[in-house]
Image (spheres, rainbow, N blue to C red):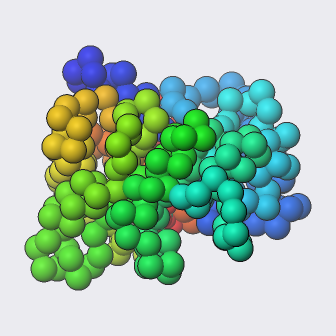
Amino acid sequence: MTPASRSRRPLLIANWKMNGLHADGIERARALAAHVGGAEAIDGDIVVCPPATLLFALRAVFAGSGVALGGQDCHAQAEGAHTGDVSAPMLSDAGCSHVIVGHSERRAGHGEGDEQVAAKAAAAHAAGLTAIVCVGESAADRDAGHALTVIGRQVGGSLPEGAAPANTVVAYEPVWAIGTGRTPGPADIEAAHRQVRAGWERRFSGGGDALRVLYGGSVSARNAGEILAVPGVDGVLVGGASLSADAFWQICQACR
Ligand code: 13P
């Protein structure tokens, strides 16, 4: 391990997506906070990204626990006539330090492209938030042998001016691995993460060594240890398994 990679502290992110009413969200957050405050401390940073409706309530639950809060998306504008959207300053106001942008469910379900993702990441930075920028190829891209090309293109187009390892994390989430129980093999994950770092280097003429690159897509308590051991993997972005505090905590412990 190089000194630079040692400085990339593991980052474990729970993306609850559109799951959780008030009562069960609070219960899950309390259970996670109890794990984090227990005897088996982990050497990593934990961020929970709940639905926006739960942010203020979870800020109170996680206060003093060391668990950080993140939004799941933000608008590129700070305020205005954008019905249904949430801005980066609003997320900051609700206690967030992070926000996911460019998730494939936003790219596919809401037609968001790289340029819009970069604008959202810039808005996150302007509000003092760390942007978690998601990239990843579809099954068709991979089958056609274009996975690394797509990843490189998304990294090049989705990172705004001013992005730095201190305010940006890139999550590699192959679309075909999300919610399917299928994951790429270690060699494919390693190659993808290398491609992300190379894309960053090209975009900013250096600095990629300090960038935290996460893997996401069907991470579970069963496979987290193997995935976190892949060179170049600095953490995980977890969907389905993060809906159980116990399962997510087991994943967090795999980074010890
Ligand atoms: P799953 O862990 O449910 O596959 O979801 C991954 C994801 O999309 C996290 O952002």
- Residue at 69%, 63% in the rendered image: 80
Residue at far front of view: 80
Residue 69 spot, x, y in % from top left: 67, 43
Q: Is residue 136 left or right of residue 78?
A: left
Horizontal relation, residue 99 to residue 170: left or right: right
> Which residue is at a point 21% across and 66% down the rendered structure image?
150
Of 129 and 210, the residue lying toward us: 129
Instruction: Name the residue: 43% across, 64% down.
Output: 116
Task: Name the residue furthest top.
Answer: 3
Q: Residue at x 62, y 66 (%)?
A: 17
**Residue 48 in view, yes or no:** no
Q: How many marks?
A: 0
Location of the N terminus by quadrant is top left
In the picture, residue 151 is in which quadrant? bottom left
* Residue 38 higher or lower than 143, as above or below: above
Residue 176 vs residue 117: left or right? left
Residue sitting at the far left: 145
Viewer can see residue 62:
yes
For residue 59, side relative to residue 11 (left or right): right
**Relative to 60, residue 176 above or below:** below
Residue 144: x and y, percent?
13, 80
Viewer-proximal residue, 16 or 91? 91
Within the image, what quadrant is residue 92 found in?
A: top right
Vertical position of residue 171 compared to residue 104: above or below? above
Q: Position of residue 121 (x, y in %)?
A: 47, 50
